Image (spheres, rainbow, N blue to C red):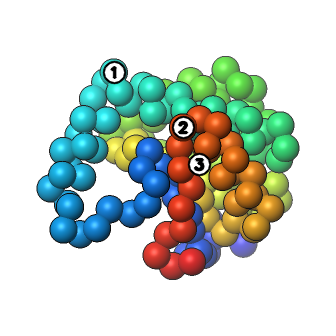
Amino acid sequence: MDIDEIMQKPYHIIDILPKRVEEGSAKQYSAVEKYYMSSFRITDVRSRLAGVIIKLSCYYNIAIAESPEEEWQSSPDPELLFSKFRACTGAGQLCVSIGSGEQLIVLDGCDTYMTVYNADEELLEMLGRLAASEGLFLWAGDNT
């Protein structure tokens, strides 16, 4: 399965917020997002997101790439993972392939959350636990 197909599959979100914000709160959400995207706060958010993936690598084979078209690095060490997450800003992207490559996590540099595509129940259970251990939340996207 290619990356474009995987990104059309059901998805979940690993986020600083416990669920999708209602449309009527868009203005406040924008202000909160801007607050968390500040240089001090985003470093903390990226560290927590990296923590999820670093811990996940104990249970699943993972590979990372700075975009789906880039070369994938298999079994990256924790320091490399951490530095890639911290460096992912602005228009940057970081992709994490899990297991056989049928499951994918994507971090866009302009976001405070990661998107998890095509995860099975076992992976979702593990991600929920790992997200909670980092003070984050896992919730279902619109197309699950």
Q: Counting residues from the N terminus, which is met first, the one under dot 3 or under dot 2?
A: 3
The residue at which mark 1 appears reads as 40
Taking the image as shown, residue 33 lies to the left or right of residue 131, namely: left
Circle 2 crowding by C-alpha within 10 Å: few under 14, some 14–19, many from 20: some
Circle 3 crowding by C-alpha within 10 Å: few under 14, some 14–19, many from 20: many
The residue under the point 78% across, 39% down is 57
Circle 1 crowding by C-alpha within 10 Å: few under 14, some 14–19, many from 20: few
The residue nearer to you, when weighing 84 against 31, is 31
Q: Is residue 108 above or below residue 20?
A: above
The residue nearer to you, when weighing 40 against 128, is 128
Mark 2 or mark 1: which is in front? Answer: 2
Q: Quadrant of residue 74?
A: top right
* Residue at mark 3 to residue at mark 2: CA–CA distance: 21 Å
Residue 16 visible in the current orientation: yes
The residue at which mark 3 appears reads as 95
Evaluate if marks 3 and 2 touch, with contact meaning CB atoms under 8 Å apart. no
* Residue at mark 3 to residue at mark 1: CA–CA distance: 23 Å
Q: Is residue 24 above or below residue 67?
A: below
The residue under the point 30% across, 35% down is 37
The residue under the point 65% across, 58% down is 104
Q: Counting residues from the N terminus, which is met first, the one under dot 3 or under dot 1?
A: 1
Q: Secondary structure at mark 2?
A: loop
| Tag 3: amino acid | Cys
Residue 51: percent from the left, percent from the top? 63, 32
Q: Which mark is residue 127?
A: none
The residue at which mark 2 appears reads as 135
| Tag 1: amino acid | Phe
Quarter that holds the C terminus:
bottom right
Residue 116: percent from the left, percent from the top? 59, 59
Q: Counting residues from the N terminus, which is met first, the one under dot 2 or under dot 1?
A: 1
